[in-house]
Image: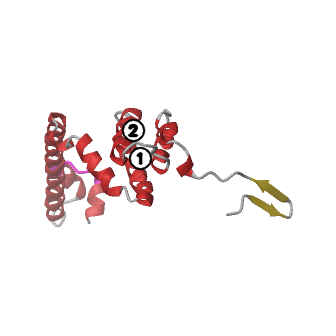
């Protein structure tokens, strides 16, 4: 693999680093989730694969704390990179062991119930609005817009769009 670019007007040399030559702890100890994810490509030394994966996932949870989206994004990157070493299955198994099902948390249930309540409220509001429009459409065949607006509570602009 070339270690330089030599083009007219451009001369650049760089060092190629084989990730397998770097101790994984070098990246695991960083306070940077991007570096942590790269540790999956490094030399595990005498550590077992599952032990390293477990360390990476625990550290990742600490680094991204309560940011579930960031955690999922980094976990996806980790799974992609782990496929280079045939570790995808190990990643998934370790993740299952470390994760609590979010839908089993009381806060999830509370949020779910509130979501249902809001959904019902919005559905009722939409239903009422559609019913007003249906009534207005019928009334407009025999009454003027101003009278229909007073009866239904719809604006004259809404009534003209119904026509």
Q: Most extreme residue toward the front, as rendered? A: 46
Residue 155 forms part of the magenta stretch:
yes
**How dense is the environment of label 2, judged by Cα within 10 Å: few (below 14), some, or many (20 and up)?**
many
Q: Nearer the viewer, residue 112 or 158?
A: 112
Image-based side of 39 in relation to 99, left or right: right
Q: Position of residue 41 (x, y in %)?
A: 48, 51
**Image quadrant occupied by the N terminus:** bottom right
According to the picture, the residue beneath numbered tag 2 turns out to be: 60
Left or right placement of residue 89 versus residue 131 in this view: right
Left or right of 81 on screen, residue 123:
left
**Secondary structure of the residue carrying numbered label 1:** helix
- Give, as a single range, the part of the protein colored magenta: 151-157
Nearest the eye: 43 or 79: 43
Furthest toward the right, the residue is 9
Q: Residue at x 72, y 58 (%)?
A: 3
Task: Find numbered disc 2 in the image and state the secondary structure of the residue it sits on.
Answer: helix
Is the residue 2 above or below the residue 28 in the image?
below
Please identify the quarter of the rendering in which residue 56 is found.
top left
Q: Earlier in the sequence, mark 1 or mark 2?
A: 2
Q: Nearer the viewer, residue 76 or 42?
A: 42
Q: Residue at x 52, y 42 (%)?
A: 23
**Residue 12: image tag:** none
Q: Is residue 148 above or below residue 101?
A: below
Left or right of 89 on screen, residue 147: left
> Residue shown at 17%/43% (left/top)?
103
The front one of 42 and 82 is 42
Label 2 near label 1: C-beta < 8 Å? yes
Which label belongs to residue 74? 1
Image quadrant occupied by the C terminus: bottom left
x and y, in percent, of residue 148 in the image: 19, 55
């Amino acid at each position: 693999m070339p270690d330089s670019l030599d083009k007219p007007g451009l001369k650049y040399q760089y060092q190629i680093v084989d990730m397998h030559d770097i101790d994984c702890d070098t990246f695991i100890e960083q306070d940077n989730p991007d570096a942590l994810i790269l540790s999956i490509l490094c030399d595990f030394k005498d550590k077992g694969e599952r032990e390293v994966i477990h360390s990476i996932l625990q550290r990742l949870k600490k680094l991204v704390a309560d940011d579930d989206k960031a955690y999922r994004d980094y976990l996806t990157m980790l799974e992609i990179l782990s496929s280079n070493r045939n570790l995808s299955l190990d990643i998934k198994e370790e993740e299952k062991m470390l994760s609590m099902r979010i839908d089993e948390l009381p806060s999830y249930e509370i949020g779910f119930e509130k979501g249902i309540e809001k959904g019902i409220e919005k559905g009722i509001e939409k239903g009422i609005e559609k019913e007003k429009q249906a009534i207005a459409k019928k009334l407009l065949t025999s009454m003027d817009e101003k009278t229909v607006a007073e009866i239904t509570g719809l604006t004259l602009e809404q009534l003209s769009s119904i026509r």
